[in-house]
Image (tube, rainbow, N blue to C red):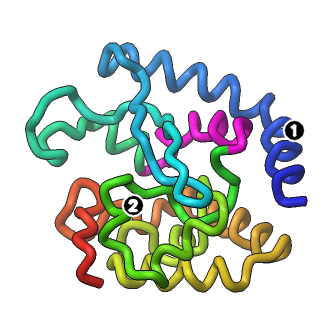
Amino acid sequence: MKRSFDILLTLITAPLWVPLLTGVACVVVAGLGFPIFFIQERLGLNEVPFRLIKFRTMRLGDAPDADRLTRLGRFLRATSLDELPELLNVLKGEMSLVGPRPLLLRYLPRYTPEQRRRHTVRPGLTGWAQVNGRNALTWEEKFAYDRWYVTHQSFALDLKILGLTLWRVVTRQGINANNEATMGEFRGDT
């Protein structure tokens, strides 16, 4: 039922997000040039890697994230518009609308057995950790919220998370970790 809901809601809302996706793509080209998208392998359901697609928010190069993140990039992140292309991951079945956020492949060996439980469900565009603090949370808090979601997931909870996500996006809460341009590296010490 969850997969059907993901497809149905994504397709029903396509008249809203497809023009927005196109407009943001044009803005990214004008502000940052090509490539438009940031594509990165992430861990999905059952720890199977997939290619996550987002709008690029940083200049190319090897400088620290804080130095490469542009004003446009900060705006796209603050409004979560950089996440719009992930709806394509949802349609492909690699992600769900709601679930733990997909993390980097290199984190897998750092997980405890409890933290690995997050991969027993599809990763989500939004999740319980996102509506409870997003990047303002510590890694320990994020994993605790992810574990709670895996244990308590339901259709009603997903609807609640989707509603709370809209509120968090409008109020721009929890976008960045403290003193970081993005979320800091997970070191496996939680």
Label 2 vs 1, first from the N-terminus? 1
Please name the residue shown 57% across and 34% down the image: 85
Our reading of the magenta stretch's main secondary structure is helix
Residue located beneath label 1 in the image: 12
Disc 2 residue type? Ile
- Residue 115 is situated, as x and y percent measured from the top left of the image, at 46, 78
Q: Nearest the camera: 86 or 120? A: 120
Q: Is residue 86 above or below residue 23?
A: below
Q: Are marks 2 and 1 in contact (CB under 8 Å)?
A: no
Please name the residue shown 61% across and 57% down the image: 45
Q: Is residue 151 above or below residue 37?
A: below
Q: Nearest the camera: 94 or 157? A: 94
User: Residue 76 appears in which quarter of the rendering?
Assistant: top left
Residue located beneath label 2 in the image: 175
Q: Which residues are magenta?
A: 78-93
Disc 1 residue type? Ile
> Is any part of residue 81 visible from this angle?
no
Q: Is residue 173 above or below residue 56?
A: below
- Residue 103 is situated, as x and y percent measured from the top left of the image, at 42, 57
Q: Is residue 91 magenta?
A: yes
Q: In the rendered picture of this protein, how many numbered marks are placed on residues?
A: 2
Please name the residue shown 45% across and 81% down the image: 113
Check disc 1 and report its element: helix, strand or loop.
helix
- Residue 104 is situated, as x and y percent measured from the top left of the image, at 37, 53
Quadrant (top left, top right, bottom left, bottom right) of the N terminus: bottom right
Describe residue 132's horizontal placement relative to residue 182 as left or right: right
